[in-house]
């Protein structure tokens, strides 16, 4: 599904190198988790994959189903099936949540040569999916993420993911700011989307989320590299002992 | 001294090319306007009130040639309305609807002398004259003095349909001067739609006198000619518990000065003036607003938004004056510019002058670029760059458009904006 090779990234404006050779291969239907200390480059990786400006790729590649992501505009990456649930979802005053979602869904359909959804069909689908995530109709009418609580913003990200049905989903700390019940809701939302043709990259600090969304692989990122890869037990090790031992092992 | 002389010379030259109607019901008002004008002269570059806008094009004896949009794309088509058409400042009876409508009296300024309109005699030039202090507005006095045409509208009940003043421009050198008077009687309710461009250069005055409990909604998409030179004044006087809401959409235009002068004379009234202006390239757009609170518990809102690119210039001068005793005034003013590149300019002069102690007044002015984080967020969801930009620009304008109460009219305005944006994207 996604193959990241030797990815090197620096800030565009400064001589600060953030990713120093990331290698990661995610097969179709797999769930991978990335853990790692603050500032190790996890969000940067997710931004660079989705095409955010301000970063310069100095080396490497990221291939999504045979196509080089790094050469595409952000909207084309989305249409190609990439989705990022943001660590910090952006508030957009003046743009209604519903308008936003419908524009996004139809833009992607159009880019893929499919028919646009009619207003009625769209409404039916969005209502059902919003309900499953306990997002009420009033929230859908508000501007995108404006006045949403931290947890509501995260649920809204998952709603977008559910509507857009991407192939490669990156979740950047979707669990942070969620209470126990919301975490369950969100995990259920994610698990409902799991299938053989869809892969996940879940960035998290906590084992807790991985109890709900069971990963096939867990990677540890430190200082811009993936320094260790293992199974779900690796997350437990981090939960119990922190990163010190793992970091020491590598050095 | 030399400065005043220059202003008066400019006036003499300008008046030489104009004729005024003789006699009639408006005779005294016109004479008084001429006298005021002689004192003021035309605006000069050094006038504080014209610091950000050069009045030269408006002062000039003749207008600059302006492109004529042969097909003015109709707006508000879905609304049943009474349409009155002016072409190059001249009333076009053949293109207009019959003026008869229940609860409303409509006359043409040019034909009013035959009728005995006491209310019009009392109103014509009166609010304009009152609006000359503390700041001079010479183009409004010029208008009062020499306007040959306009509408005199008196509404006594709830108007069954909006009145649609539709301007058309056929000549690339027309110099239109129109003066409208609107009297909203106690408890009456009227919507006025004012669309299009009446000439290569236009000077339009609207005096609106709103009696107790009366309501006047005014929505004005000004047409998208690039070459137009335009100066407009709205003078509104609000009695107790009355309401005035005015929204202006401006697209393109090398020179536009829209002034609104509003005075609360009765308690518990509400006035909202809003504007959305979009310009690309040779565009100079000036909103100048003066709101005087002279009554209790009145609410005023000024919401002005401008989208500027390729060297466009936006100006906002807005003042809230709260007189002594105008307690519990609620005044709000916001002016914002969205710069789509680094070449454009926004000049804002927000002012509060408050002589009462128990009031809430706020004002803010900002200018900034499109929010990159929001743009990326939209694109990351598959929304193409241009669509994403349009969404954000419309979002920026939304607070101004929200001042239009009628949702159908607001939707038409939004569609017009979207259309403009789609034509002006990229460089
Ligand atoms: N636009 C930027 N400007 C300056 N520094 C940046 C920028 N983007 C990332 N960085 C820096 O790069 C490093 C990696 O940041 P990143 O957000 O990717 O970390 P992270 O692993 O997601 O951390 P966290 O666990 O706290 O979310 C940090 O030191 C951060 O300060
Ligand atoms: Mg992060």
Image (tube, coloured by chain):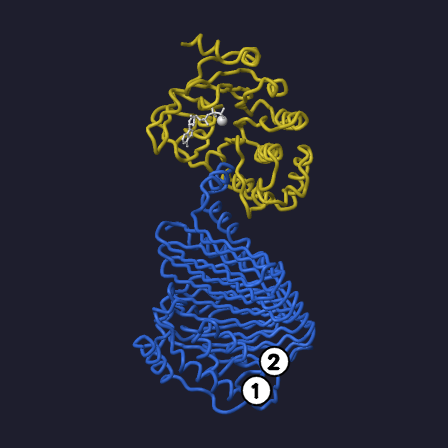
Question: Residue drawn 35% across and 52% down?
Answer: B343
The image quadrant in which ligand 1 is located: top left
- Rendered image: mark on residue B94: none
Q: Residue A184 appears in which quarter of the rendering?
A: top right
Chain identifier for the blue-coloured part of the image: B
- The residue nearer to you, when weighing B136 against B107, is B136
Pinpoint the chain carrying mark 1: B
Q: Quadrant of the N terminus of chain B?
A: bottom left
In the rendered image, the residue lying farthest to the top is A249
What residue is disc 1 on? B112
Is disc 2 surrounded by few (<14), some (14 to 19) or many (20+) residues within 10 Å?
Answer: some
* Badge 1 or badge 2: first in the primary sequence: 2
Residue A248 on image: x %, y %? 44, 9
What residue is disc 2 on? B106
- Is label 2 in a helix, a strand or a loop? strand
Taking the image as shown, residue A74 lies to the left or right of residue B165, namely left
Is disc 1 surrounded by few (<14), some (14 to 19) or many (20+) residues within 10 Å?
Answer: some
């Amino acid at each position: 599904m996604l193959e990241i090779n030797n990815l090197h990234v620096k800030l565009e404006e400064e001589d600060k190198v953030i990713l120093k050779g990331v290698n990661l291969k995610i097969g179709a239907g797999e769930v991978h988790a990335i853990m790692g200390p603050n500032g190790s480059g996890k969000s940067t990786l997710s931004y660079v994959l989705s095409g955010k400006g301000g970063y310069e790729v100095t080396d490497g590649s990221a291939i999504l189903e045979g196509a080089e992501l790094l050469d595409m505009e952000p909207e084309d990456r989305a249409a190609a099936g990439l989705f990022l649930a943001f660590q910090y979802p952006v508030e957009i005053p003046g743009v209604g949540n519903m308008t936003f979602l419908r524009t996004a869904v139809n833009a992607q359909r159009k880019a893929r040569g499919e028919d646009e959804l009619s207003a009625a069909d769209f409404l039916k689908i969005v209502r059902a999916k919003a309900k499953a995530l306990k997002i009420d109709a009033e929230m859908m009418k508000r501007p995108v993420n404006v006045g949403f609580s931290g947890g509501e913003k995260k649920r809204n990200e998952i709603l977008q993911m559910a509507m857009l049905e991407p192939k490669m989903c990156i979740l950047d700390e979707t669990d942070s700011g969620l209470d126990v019940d919301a975490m369950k809701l969100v995990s259920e939302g994610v698990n409902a989307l799991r299938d053989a043709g869809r892969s996940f990259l879940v960035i998290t600090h906590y084992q807790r989320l991985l109890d709900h969304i069971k990963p096939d692989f867990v990677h540890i990122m430190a200082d811009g590299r993936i320094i260790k890869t293992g199974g779900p037990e690796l997350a437990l090790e981090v939960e119990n002992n922190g990163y010190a031992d793992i970091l020491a092992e590598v050095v | 001294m030399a400065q005043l002389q220059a202003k008066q010379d400019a006036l003499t030259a300008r008046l030489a090319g104009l004729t005024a109607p003789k006699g009639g019901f408006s005779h005294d008002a016109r004479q008084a306007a001429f006298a005021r004008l002689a004192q003021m002269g035309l605006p000069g570059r050094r006038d504080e009130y014209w610091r950000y806008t050069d009045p030269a094009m408006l002062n000039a004896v003749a207008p600059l040639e302006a492109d004529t949009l042969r097909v003015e794309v109709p707006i508000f088509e879905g609304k049943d309305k009474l349409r009155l058409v002016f072409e190059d400042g001249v009333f076009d009876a053949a293109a207009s609807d019959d003026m008869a409508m229940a609860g409303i009296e409509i006359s043409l300024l040019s034909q009013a002398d035959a009728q005995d309109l006491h209310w019009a005699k009392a109103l014509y030039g009166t609010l304009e004259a009152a609006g000359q202090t503390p700041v001079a507005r010479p183009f409004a006095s010029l208008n009062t003095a020499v306007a040959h045409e306009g509408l005199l509208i008196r509404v006594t009940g709830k108007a069954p349909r909006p009145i649609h003043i539709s301007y058309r421009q056929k000549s690339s050198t027309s110099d239109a001067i129109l003066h409208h008077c609107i009297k909203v009687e106690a408890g009456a309710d009227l919507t006025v739609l004012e669309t299009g461009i009446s000439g290569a250069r236009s000077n339009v005055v609207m005096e609106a006198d709103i009696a107790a409990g009366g309501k006047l909604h005014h929505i004005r998409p000004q047409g998208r000619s690039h070459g137009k030179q335009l100066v407009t004044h709205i003078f509104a006087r609000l009695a107790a518990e009355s309401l005035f809401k005015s929204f202006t959409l401006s697209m393109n235009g090398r020179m536009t000065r829209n002034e609104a002068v509003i005075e609360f004379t009765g308690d518990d009234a509400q006035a909202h003036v809003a504007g959305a202006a979009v310009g690309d390239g040779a565009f100079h757009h000036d909103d100048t607003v003066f709101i005087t609170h002279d009554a209790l518990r009145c609410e005023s809102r000024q919401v002005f938004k401008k989208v500027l690119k390729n060297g466009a210039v936006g100006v906002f001068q807005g003042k809230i004056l709260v007189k002594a005793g105008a307690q519990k005034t609620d005044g709000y003013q916001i002016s914002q510019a969205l710069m789509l590149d680094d070449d454009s300019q926004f000049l804002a002069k927000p002012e509060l002058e408050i002589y009462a102690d128990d009031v809430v007044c706020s004002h803010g002015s900002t200018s900034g670029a499109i929010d990159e984080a929001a743009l990326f967020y939209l694109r990351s969801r598959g929304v193409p760059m241009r669509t994403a930009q349009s969404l954000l620009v419309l979002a920026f304008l939304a607070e101004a458009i929200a001042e239009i109460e009628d949702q159908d009219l607001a939707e038409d305005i939004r569609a017009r904006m979207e259309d403009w944006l789609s034509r002006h994207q990229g460089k």
